[in-house]
Image (spheres, rainbow, N blue to C red):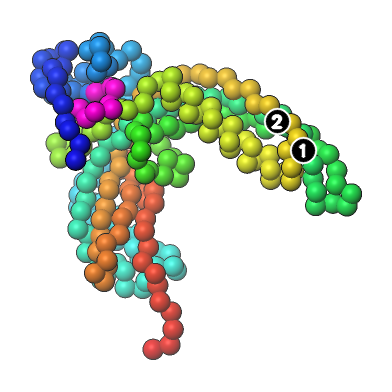
Amino acid sequence: MSIVEEIRCSNCGAPLQFNPGEIVATCRYCGFTQVIETGKAFEFEHSMILNEYNQVQVDDLVRNWMRGGFLKPGDLARSSKIEEKNLTYIPFWVVSVTATSSYKGVFERLTPPVTKEGKIEKKYNWLVLARKATDFPTREYEVPLEGKTPYDFRKIEGFAKVLNSEVEKDEAIDMAKQEIENLHGFLAKQDVDKIIEMKTDIEIGDAVYLHAPVWFIVYEYKHERYNLLLDGATGAVIKGDIPSAKFGLI
């Protein structure tokens, strides 16, 4: 069980709760964002994506998801019970990156094998989850950045939970670099079977600290519990557990 510590907000003096390991905290009373160790104001852009759905609308979105797709049991929407609906604003770093990779490799699917060279050039708004040891499908989540707006604590629902960051900017940038290098290595291996040389140049632009709304859903179907993540901005399902559908003659 985590221990919640408490300090005072540097801006309004209200209690500022945080968990061990969190390094950036936002006051729920005035919206002031500060670095926990120093109490100084957070220097980087702090933005948010607004939640567009209430709890009733979330029910409808979940039921619609249950009705679609041939892999789901036919009675899933009818026989399921939604047991939990929790809205959480999750912290991310969004790192603007231009990455160029040059590679040389061997294409072995021909006889004789041939040596090939190639280049991968891409621009990213790379998403880095600002939480550690957390199981969240970051690569499956496309944050609707067109809806990004300055963080405003008054627009956070009273029942919602806001998580603080456990990752600082420089660490987020290093994580983005490593993940992009891994991605480019994977893409290069779609073109060649064995990489001989590869070099990736990465240019970093802005890094934005952002909170995005995600609904954490738990539903019950035939005495089993399943999890579903719903994007609070778009209503899209980020990831959902599907009960095994049984096929056969009746």
Q: Quadrant of the C terminus?
A: bottom left
Q: How far across and how far down the image is residue 8, in percent?
A: 13, 17
Q: How far apart are marks 2 and 1 (CA)?
A: 9 Å
Mark 2: amino acid: Met
Residue at (15%, 17%) from the top-left corner?
9
Residue 18 magenta:
yes
| Residue 234 visible in the displayed image | no
Give the secondary structure at mark 2: strand
Q: In this view, does 225 lie above or below 237?
A: below
Q: Which of 117 and 235 is in front in this view?
A: 117
| Residue 242 visible in the displayed image | yes
Residue 64 magenta:
no
Q: How crowded is mark 1: few (under 14 residues within 10 Å), some or many (20 or more)?
A: many
Q: How crowded is mark 2: few (under 14 residues within 10 Å), some or many (20 or more)?
A: some
Residue at (58%, 36%) from the top-left corner?
182
Which residue in the rendered view is the most extreme toward the right?
112
Q: Is residue 136 above or below residue 175?
A: below
The reply to whether dot 2 and dot 1 touch (C-beta < 8 Å) is yes
Q: Is residue 69 left or right of residue 64?
A: right
Q: How far across and how far down the image is residue 188, in percent?
A: 68, 39
* Residue named by callout 2: 198
Q: How far across and how far down the image is residue 205, in percent?
A: 51, 18
Q: Quadrant of the N terminus?
A: top left
Specify the label residue 105 is tagged with: 1
Which residue in the rendered view is the most extreme toward the left?
14
Q: Which of 123 and 241 is in front in this view?
A: 241
Region in magenta? 17-25
Mark 1: amino acid: Gly
Q: Is residue 5 left or right of residue 245?
A: left
Q: How far across and how far down the image is residue 129, in percent?
A: 39, 34
